[in-house]
Amino acid sequence: MEQALSAGVAAHGEDVPRRHGAKIQRYFEPLDAQELEETAFDWHSRRSNAQYVDFRGSELSVPSKNFDRDGAEQILADTEELLEFVRERMDDEA
């Protein structure tokens, strides 16, 4: 998702933000695609919480335990939807 959004931002001749949340915000700002924007922010949040072994309160958070097969299949489907959206938008502007 992050690379697709980076490409979409760069295609408009804008500087690509370094932080993923800023990329999502910059890409979707001028668009009417709130549901897709919320999906991108949701996965960004989940990924951020799963990058490192960490303590959350008294619980040990281990990245490999945060996602199961269903979650993996869902992020793949959501990513395909986002990729198609970015492709169509870039094609329309070409």
Image (tube, helix red, strand yellow):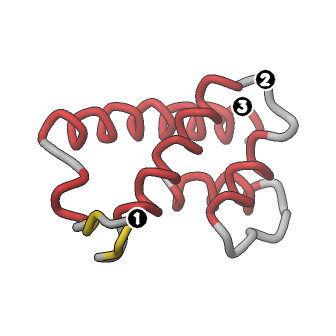
Q: Residue at x 70, y 25 (%)?
A: 33
Q: Marks 3 and 1: in contact by CB < 8 Å?
A: no
Q: Residue at x 41, y 58 (%)?
A: 47
Q: Is residue 72 above or below residue 26?
A: above
**Label 2 CA crowd tier, 10 Å (few <14, some 14–19, many 20+):** few
> In which quadrant of the rendered view does residue 81 lie?
top left
**Residue for badge 3:** 92
Q: Is residue 1 left or right of residue 37?
A: left
- 52 or 34: nearer the eye? 52
Q: Earlier in the sequence, mark 2 or mark 3?
A: 2
Amino acid on which disc 2 is placed: Asp
Q: Position of residue 16 (x, y in %)?
A: 74, 69
Q: Is residue 92 left or right of residue 39?
A: right
Marks 1, 2: nearer the viewer: 1
Q: Is residue 36 above or below residue 21?
A: above
**Label 1 CA crowd tier, 10 Å (few <14, some 14–19, many 20+):** few
**Label 3 CA crowd tier, 10 Å (few <14, some 14–19, many 20+):** few
Q: Earlier in the sequence, mark 1 or mark 2?
A: 2
Q: Is residue 12 left or right of residue 7?
A: right
Q: Is residue 11 above or below residue 81?
A: below
Disc 2 is placed on an element classified as loop
**Residue for badge 2:** 32
**Residue for badge 1:** 57
